[in-house]
Amino acid sequence: MRAVVTGGAGFLGSHLTDRLIHDGWSVVVLDNLITGDLANIEHLFGHERFQFIKQDVTEFLYVKGDIDFVFHFASPASPVDFERFPIQVLKVGALGTHKALGLAKDKCAKFMLASTSEVYGDPLVSPQPETYWGNVNPIGPRGVYDEAKRYAEAMTMAYHHFHKVDTRIVRFFNTYGPRMRLDDGRVVPNLVSQALSGKPLTVYGDGEQTRSFGYVADIIDGVVRLAGSDFHEPINIGSEDERTVMEFAQTVLKLTGSGSRIEHLPALPDDPRKRRPDLTRAKEILGWHPSTGLEGGLELTLAYFREKLKLVNLNP
């Protein structure tokens, strides 16, 4: 089997690439490195079943040879990216998805879209089932990402129904683990890097907003199971272990042994108050559920961040 992974130098894309290579696939990674990092895939350079092409997926895509599967994982995905690269976020969701679907159609390949729980916006129901249509502010600071992914899902289903492309849609909830960026801006890298650096842990608002954190190895296992299924509608992949941000901050302090204090900052606009997936589809259709507890996954993540911070301190 031969796959194309767009955004394969990013956090989730690189872990997916590793898993596919481990499972015997050949993988072509396409990434323009706007938020991806070659350090995430450099261990694969020289591997006979790996190829890297620096490519903006919003432009024409050409990959020589047969392709069995296109995994479209390209997109900036953190709040800081939405401010720095708003146009690029919209373009990769719209034009990038169109180009990636076109490649799958041309190669008669299967296709998977990496979507997000952000399509639910600030949800009015919890946990969120895939049948929930969401509560999204299209012109708010998160709108560029939320609407790009909603559009991408619509485009994917259109190609499935009209062009008969064999598609899948995975909606990721808060995923964490090694290879997250220090400047990612999301809850896990923010609080972990602050705790390890002895800085105040910044919590926005009252900290009672909830997140459900899934460890990356579990999440990628769900992706692989979905790839092997014949299910075409969106499916949630994440953890049901719902924690408030304050609870998470206290867990980070406990595991790091940090003496940092918690500092409250003004609430972010459109920050979701609830995040918890309904995993009924994943359990019934894929036979999947996460197996890594938050504390165990955080221990593995802390080891990675400690090394990253050492490198940053050595090369300021």
Image (tube, rainbow, N blue to C red):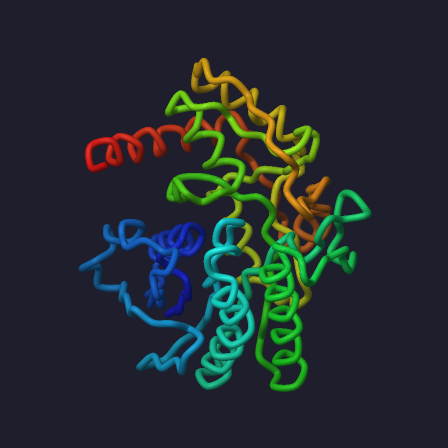
The answer to whether residue 212 is left or right of residue 181 is right
Q: Position of residue 20 (x, y in %)?
A: 39, 57
| Image quadrant in which you'd find residue 139 | bottom right
Q: Residue at x 46, y 71 (%)?
A: 69
Question: Number of numbered discs present?
Answer: 0
Is residue 315 shown above or below 296? below
The answer to whether residue 98 is left or right of residue 12 is right
**Which of these two is toward me, 263 or 96?**
263
Quarter of the image that includes the N terminus: bottom left
| Image quadrant in which you'd find residue 247 | top right
Q: Residue at x 69, y 47 (%)?
A: 279
The residue most toward the right is 124
Q: Position of residue 291 (x, y in %)?
A: 56, 35
Is residue 110 shown above or below 311? below
The answer to whether residue 120 is left or right of residue 58 is right
Q: Position of residue 146 (x, y in %)?
A: 63, 59
Quarter of the image that includes the C terminus: top left
Q: Residue at x 40, y 29 (%)?
A: 302
Q: Position of residue 75 (x, y in %)?
A: 48, 61
**Which of these two is toward me, 57 or 198?**
198
